């Protein structure tokens, strides 16, 4: 608990204190024309819209629970959709190719983790960023900022992060119990055995023997990243920064002996699919239903990753 509080404080400090407080200011223009005024208003006034001028998206507080069955159903439809056969085949080929070299690709990172105390310390902190605790902290930041600033988009993002964590986490846990693949730290063969449908009691007693495929950390992280990026399409830096972070998290998980690199393609695909299903459900309403708040909170990356609080006057 003490370690969790310390990490939480560190992450909260990085996100909150490094965020910009962008306060719109007036300036004097001797001969402003209509196009200049319109451009200035669009630049300085961020409201609760999701990227359109006339519409805003809705949410319900119970969405993470009540939309759970719908998310699972839509995911199943996508999996069995014939148009996705090339994608599924590509994932199978990529996973197989990575599996053939799993031992040689993961061993250097695993050995470094075992022999270097500094490597262990850094690796543990990085891998923690891919876990559910960090995702819930991010959701709390969005939700808290949304409540304080009365910003519906931030609140909706927080709820969708929780929803993504729940539904994606459940799907991955079920697949782990179907595949039963050994993790590197418990491998009895160079690439880890698959023991399909292991006994649930044995699984609970020794998870590392069965939980490797696919990666829950990367799957849920991808779902959360997709939700945030889709809710803030104007913040173009989110995806490249997020994908880079996912790569680093993936290396840290391999270094700890939790996953092989071949555990990742399917995990990332599952997370992306759920992120798109959840963020794509946003319903649009007309102007008379739109929140007119001039306060907003959006992700930013100027002095580091953070939340930008904006107010126009």
Image (spheres, rainbow, N blue to C red):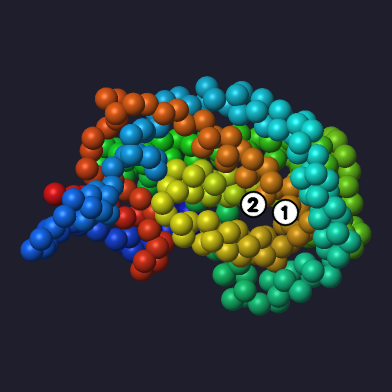
Q: Is residue 60 left or right of residue 197?
A: left
Q: How many marks?
A: 2
Which residue: 86% across, 59% down?
A: 97
As displayed, is residue 33 above or below residue 123? Answer: above
Residue bearing mark 2: 218
Do the residues bearing badges 2 and 1 touch, measured as CB atoms within 8 Å?
yes
Residue 7 locus on image (x, y percent)? 46, 58
The dot on residue 238 is: none
The crowd level at tag 1 (other Cα within 10 Å; few <14, some 14-19, many 20+) is: many
Q: Is residue 71 left or right of residue 61?
A: right
Quarter holding residue 264: bottom right
Where is 43 relative to 111, above or below?
Answer: above
State the image coordinates of residue 188 (x, y, percent, origin top left).
Answer: 90, 58
Q: SS at mark 2? A: helix
Q: Nearer the viewer, residue 130 or 207?
A: 130
Q: Is residue 143 above or below residue 72?
A: below
Instruction: Using the image, tell me which numbered label, if any, was put on residue 264.
Output: 1
Q: CA distance from mark 2 to mark 1?
A: 7 Å
Q: Secondary structure at mark 1?
A: helix
- Residue drawn 72% across and 57% down? 258
**Residue 252 screen position, x and y as percent:** 65, 64
**In the image, residue 160 above or below residue 206:** above
């Amino acid at each position: 608990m003490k370690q969790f509080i310390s990490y939480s404080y560190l992450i909260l400090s990085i996100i909150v204190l490094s965020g910009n407080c962008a306060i719109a200011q007036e300036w004097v223009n001797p001969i402003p024309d209509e196009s200049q005024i319109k451009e200035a208003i669009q630049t300085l006034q961020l409201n609760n819209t999701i990227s359109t001028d006339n519409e805003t998206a809705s949410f319900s507080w119970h969405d993470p629970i009540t939309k759970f069955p719908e998310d699972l159903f839509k995911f199943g439809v996508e999996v069995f959709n014939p148009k996705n056969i090339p994608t599924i085949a590509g994932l199978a080929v990529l996973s197989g190719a990575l599996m053939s070299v799993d031992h040689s690709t993961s061993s250097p990172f695993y050995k470094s983790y075992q022999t270097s105390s500094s490597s262990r310390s850094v690796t543990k902190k990085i891998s923690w960023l891919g876990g559910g605790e960090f995702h819930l902290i991010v959701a709390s930041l969005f939700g808290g900022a949304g409540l304080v600033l009365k910003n519906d988009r931030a609140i909706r993002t927080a709820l969708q992060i929780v929803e993504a964590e729940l539904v994606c986490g459940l799907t991955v846990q079920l697949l782990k119990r179907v595949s039963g693949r050994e993790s590197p730290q418990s491998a009895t063969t160079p690439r880890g055995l698959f023991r399909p449908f292991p006994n649930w009691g044995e699984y609970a007693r020794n998870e590392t023997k069965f939980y490797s495929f696919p990666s829950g950390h990367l799957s849920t992280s991808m779902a959360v990243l997709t939700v945030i990026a889709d809710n803030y399409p104007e913040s173009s830096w989110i995806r490249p920064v997020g994908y880079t972070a996912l790569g680093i998290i993936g290396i840290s998980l391999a270094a700890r002996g939790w996953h092989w690199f071949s555990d990742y393609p399917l995990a990332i695909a599952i997370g992306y699919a759920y992120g798109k299903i959840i963020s794509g459900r946003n319903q649009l309403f007309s102007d008379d239903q739109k929140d007119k708040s001039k306060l907003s909170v959006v992700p930013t990356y100027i002095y580091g990753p953070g939340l930008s609080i904006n107010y126009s006057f």
